[in-house]
Image (spheres, grey):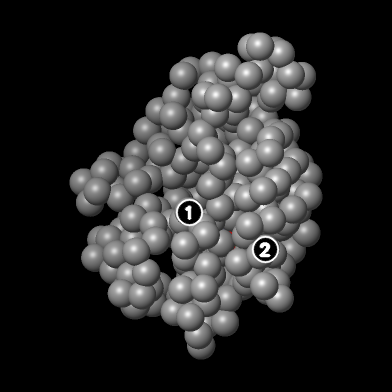
Amino acid sequence: MSATAFLSEPSPGAFTLAMMRSPARIAPSILAADFAHLAQEIKLIEDHVDLLHVDVMDGHFVPNISLGPPVISSLRGATNLYLDCHLMITDPLAYLEPLCEAGANGVTVHIEAVPDPSAVAREAGVLGLDFGLVINPPTPVAAVEPYLEIVSMVVVMSVHPGLGGQAFLTSALGKIAALRELIDSHALATDIQVDGGIDLRTAASARAAGADVFVAGTAVFRAPDPVRAVREIRTILDRM
Ligand code: DX5
Ligand code: ZN
């Protein structure tokens, strides 16, 4: 029986497993923020969130261009939050050092961009960056399975990368559950992050499937009251 099955059927065993699960963490994506007022947008929510998700796009791995090391450096000066940098770029190895110097804490790299991520993982380790791998909607969990022991996080994309404001793809849920099972059966501490289309309803589904870290852009920064939006997501996640 899977860990998620235990959690959905309360029993003494489920209680023990639930106690062992890492607390849910919320990572707002600044992609949905007003780039002209980034510092103010972040200050507003920083005491209520766990990480800040920073989407780096190169106009090549994905069609859009977003931001890079200079903006990350400014963010570093504006907040002490953990900067979780999602690299939607073709050549992550070339940018790890500038990202580290800019103040990134962790980087996640697409397995579709770097089919053998060993060298990037090594370089991240040398620089002291946390390292994670991301899988796109069509990419199976098997693509990252060989690397579960060398990553601190696996990110399951629940939208196609490159754009905020898209609808959550429910096909992500089965992948999260499969990863949860793999990670738990090997007693690994690897976190599962879910990225894209997260709101109150989809956050609950992803938590039930086994996710640990919840990236929400639109649902936080486009909400009339971003602090309230974060609190509501946390209330739902903490109840599970
Ligand atoms: C998509 C990005 C996501 C996105 C999430 O390429 O990786 O982080 O900003 O934003 P929402 O919550 O709007 O889907
Ligand atoms: Zn992202």
Q: Quadrant of residue 12?
A: top right
- The residue indicated by pointer 1 is 50
**Sequence-first tag of 1 and 2:** 1
Q: Quadrant of residue 207?
A: top right
Name the residue nearer the viewer: 226 or 56: 226
Asked if residue 136 is positioned above or below residue 97 in the image, the reply reads above
Residue at (70, 18) in percent of width and height: 6
Judge whether residue 62 can be spotted in this image. no
Three-letter code for the amino acid on which mark 1 is drawn: Asp
Residue at (44, 79) in percent of width and height: 39
Mark identifier at residue 35: none
Three-letter code for the amino acid on which mark 2 is drawn: Ala
- The residue sitting at the bottom extreme is 36
Mark identifier at residue 229: 2
Image quarter in which the C terminus is found: top right
Q: Disc 1 to disc 2, how far (Cα)? A: 14 Å
Q: Position of residue 130 (x, y in %)?
A: 35, 46
Q: Position of residue 35 (x, y in %)?
A: 52, 82
- The residue sitting at the left extreme is 126
Q: Position of residue 17 (x, y in %)?
A: 59, 20
Left or right: where does residue 38 sit relative to residue 71? right
Helix, strand or loop for disc 2: helix
Asked if residue 148 is positioned above or below residue 215 in the image, the reply reads above
Image quarter in which the N terminus is found: top right
Mark 2 closeness class: few <14, some 14–19, many ≥20 residues within 10 Å: many
